[in-house]
Image (cartoon, grey):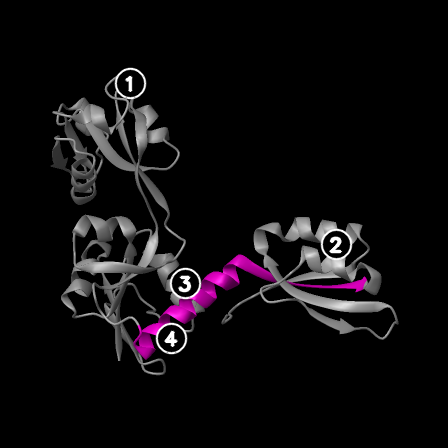
């Protein structure tokens, strides 16, 4: 039975459970449940603190985990990313009072406060910068005002909270994070159950990215239409009862669907429909 770690709370928890449900796996009904067994799919789920998941997976006690790339790197655990999942995206940046620094090279001799000591210390070391790192569990913006540090390193989305604290970001991003599937370093990812799990999640990712598009067009416009909707392999083309017309079906990127529909209409295609894809295997 495959043993999988899932975040029990925070920004990773809900989207991870939703993706697993879409992939056909049973999920817990109450937040108090710490472990459930899905006998049909031969999977056992353990609901753990996101920061602890990389540690459990690296120990070999659990086969696979879903956590953040930031948490994986920060943990320094012997685990590796095997599939990005596209949600819980974030960017890590340095921030300080205006004029403090322009880049990581200006941090020599300074103190940096962060909740992600492993990431920041590693980034500073890779950049050849000798600076001190202070670990705080949260609200790192106040570290500068209270004199704990001259610089902070934290997740930046809009930057509003930093500006409200009189701070500004500087330099290149430290890293970009998102939810990822992880496996113990060196473990066999070709195992049948692991591959099935990854294929299911990849199927959800594709289903969320594409829609199925159906339309009718005249035969003389088919090549132009196919150029707009090439599909993954090639579109399905079927003759219609009315001579000179064909029906076309193809997968198209969801974010481009409206533009493609407009372009198809302009070349004479009609009865243009899009349908959500709930699952797939490529």
**Residue, disc 3:** 18
Disc sitting over residue 48 in the figure: none
**Residue, disc 2:** 264
**Alpha-carbon span between mark 4 and mark 2:** 37 Å
Q: Is mark 3 on a helix, strand or loop?
A: helix
* Residue 100 point in image, percent of width and height: 23, 19
State the quadrant of the N terminus.
bottom left
**Alpha-carbon span between mark 4 and mark 1:** 51 Å
The answer to whether mark 3 and mark 2 are in CB contact below 8 A is no
* Residue 3 point in image, percent of width and height: 25, 73
**Alpha-carbon span between mark 1 and mark 3:** 41 Å
At x 42% / y 73%, what residue is drawn? 24
**Residue, disc 4:** 196
Neighbourhood count class around disc 4 (C-alpha, 10 Å): few under 14, some 14–19, many 20 upward: few
84 or 279, which is in the foreground? 84
Whichever of labels 3 and 4 marks the residue nearer the N terminus, that label is: 3
**Residue, disc 1:** 98
At x 51% / y 70%, what residue is drawn? 280
**Alpha-carbon span between mark 1 and mark 2:** 51 Å
Looking at the rendering, the stretch of residues picked out in magenta corresponds to: 190-217
């Amino acid at each position: 039975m495959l043993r999988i770690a899932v975040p029990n709370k925070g920004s990773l928890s809900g989207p991870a459970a939703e993706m697993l449900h879409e992939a056909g796996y049973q999920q817990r009904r109450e937040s108090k449940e710490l472990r459930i067994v899905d006998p049909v799919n031969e999977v056992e789920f353990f609901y753990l603190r996101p920061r602890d998941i990389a540690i459990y997976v690296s120990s070999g006690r659990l086969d696979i985990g879903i956590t953040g790339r930031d948490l994986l790197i920060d943990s320094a655990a012997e685990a590796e990313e095997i599939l990005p999942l596209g949600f819980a995206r974030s960017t890590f940046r340095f921030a300080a009072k205006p004029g403090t620094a322009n880049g990581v090279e200006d941090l020599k001799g300074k103190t940096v406060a962060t909740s992600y000591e492993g990431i920041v210390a590693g980034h500073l070391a890779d950049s050849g910068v000798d600076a001190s790192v202070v670990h705080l569990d949260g609200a790192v913006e106040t570290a500068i005002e209270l004199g704990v540090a001259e610089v902070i390193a934290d997740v930046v989305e809009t930057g509003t909270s930093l500006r409200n604290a009189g701070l500004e970001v500087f330099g290149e991003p430290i890293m970009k994070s998102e939810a990822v599937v992880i496996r113990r370093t060196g473990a066999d990812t070709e195992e049948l159950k692991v591959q099935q799990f990854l294929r299911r999640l990849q199927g959800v990712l594709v289903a969320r990215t594409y829609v199925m598009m159906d339309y009718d067009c005249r035969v003389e416009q088919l090549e132009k239409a196919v150029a707009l909707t090439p599909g993954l392999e090639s579109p399905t083309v079927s003759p219609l009862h009315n001579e000179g017309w064909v029906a076309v079906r193809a997968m198209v990127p969801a974010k481009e669907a409206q533009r493609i529909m407009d372009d198809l209409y302009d070349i004479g295609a009609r009865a243009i429909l899009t349908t959500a894809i709930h699952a797939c295997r490529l």
